[in-house]
Structure formats: structure tokens, C-alpha cells
Image (spheres, helix red, strand yellow):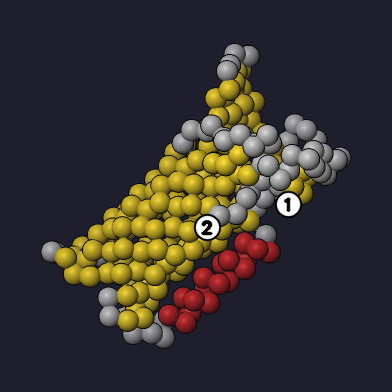
Amino acid sequence: MTKVMYIVFMFLSTVAFSTAQNSTSFAVLGGLNLQNLTGKDELGAKLDNDLITGFHAGVNAQIPIASEFYFQPGLLFSTKGAKNEDGLFTSTYRLSYIELPLNLVFKTVLGPGYFMLGFGPYLAYGILGKVKNEGSGGSVESDIEFKNTIELSDPLSTTYFKALDAGGNIFVGYELNNGIFLNFNTQLGMLKINPKDNRNPLSSDEKSIKNTGFGLSLGYRF
């Protein structure tokens, strides 16, 4: 939770600084996530997962830095994950993050509002996780445990991920003069979120799992 508090502190510090700037605006937003877990398995083969739906909700600040350019930090609660179908069994992974996007935004007048194009890095920290395994005999749901290293003594029945995630995102959107806006974004994780597995050290370097996905946000700026 210390890293979660650090992410929140970074956002609040940026907001506190931005209140001293002219023309700074704020927004509330939420929307749909289409997420996947991509990469390679223990043998180096490409993961064959399917997208799942999730959601995000939060706030952001928009700080002018030059004509038509803005710095836009945000703080979101965002759900991610993937679905894997392997013969008679289906596993659905759902991960919940506190996320800090730090975007540079180009915003220019177009028609009755503004066209927006933004890009930048994000930092996220996992706080909750569930995996649901379904088969002909029924379904079982269990908690995901966040840790950086899986030890020899850790149970085989538990699913593990690293809590810390980071990557890049890009979005395009439109904002009306009344403050209502719609954004479409895509996100690419750049950190492996699978822990080092001391139970199988020879395959740990081959395995690579990363968050990727798309999102649609509806918000209001004031």
C-alpha cells in the first residue's frame, strides 16, 4: 500500500501545484476497458488470451504549458485482465489497479468544441485480483496474490502477479464547449507483471506477461 499512497501523493502534489496556474481545469471521467494479457508463457510460446471487459473511473487536471498544449495528470481506478480458454477449462483473470496517467495533450478548436490528441506514460499499482476457473464440474474463484518473487514454499494453487505496472498510452478525443468530452485510448504495458518463480528458475526468463488494451471514456471538464 505504500506505493499506492505514493501514486496518490504524486497526483495530489501535481494538483496542488496546478491550482496556482492560470486556466487550469479539472475533470471527472469513467468508461469501458477492453483488456488483455499478452506476452509469452514458460516455454516462450505466444500467449493465446482473449479480451475481457472492465471499467475505469477517476479524475484528472489539465494544466496549460504552451499554446494548444497541456499537461494532463490523472488518478484512476482501472480494472484489467484476460480470459484463457484451454480445452474444457476457461480461466478469467481480473486485476484492479490504482493508475496515474501523465499525458501531454494537444488541444485545438474544431467546430463547436476541441479536438484532442494525447500521449504519455502511466504508472499503476495492483490492489485487488481474482481468478475464476470454470469447467464441466463447475467453477472456482480465488484471490490473486501480488508479489515480486514466488518462493519454493508458496502454494501451487495460488495465482501470482507483480503489483507494479508501467507503460505508455495514447488517446484521441473531442470536447464540447460545455465541458463534456469523449476519448478513445489504447494502452501498452512495458513492464512484465509476472513474478520471478523460484520454483522453476530455468523458465522464468522466458515468461513475459504484460497488460495491453483499449478504452472509451466519457467525462466532464470544469
Q: Quadrant where the N terminus lies?
A: bottom right
| Vertical position of residue 34 compared to residue 22: above or below | above
**What residue type is disc 1 on?**
Asn
Q: Residue placed at 47% from the left, 36% from the top?
A: 52
Q: Residue 53, percent across and down?
A: 44, 39
Mark 1, other Cα within 10 Å: few <14 / some 14–19 / many ≥20: some
Q: Is residue 2 above or below residue 154?
A: below
Which residue is located at x 56 percent, y 67 percent?
A: 8
Instruction: Report the residue at 48% width, 79% height from top.
Output: 16
Label 1 sits on a secondary structure element that is loop
CA neighbours of label 2 inside 10 A, class few (<14), some (14 to 19), many (20+): some
The answer to which of marks 1 and 2 sits earlier in the sequence is 1
Drawn side of residue 152 relative to residue 36, left or right: right
Residue occupied by mark 2:
167
Report x, y in % for residue 191: 60, 54
Q: Quadrant of the C terminus?
A: bottom left
Badge 2 amino acid: Gly
Tag on residue 69? none
Residue 190 visible in the picture: yes
- Residue labelled with disc 1: 148
Q: Nearer the viewer, residue 37 or 77?
A: 37
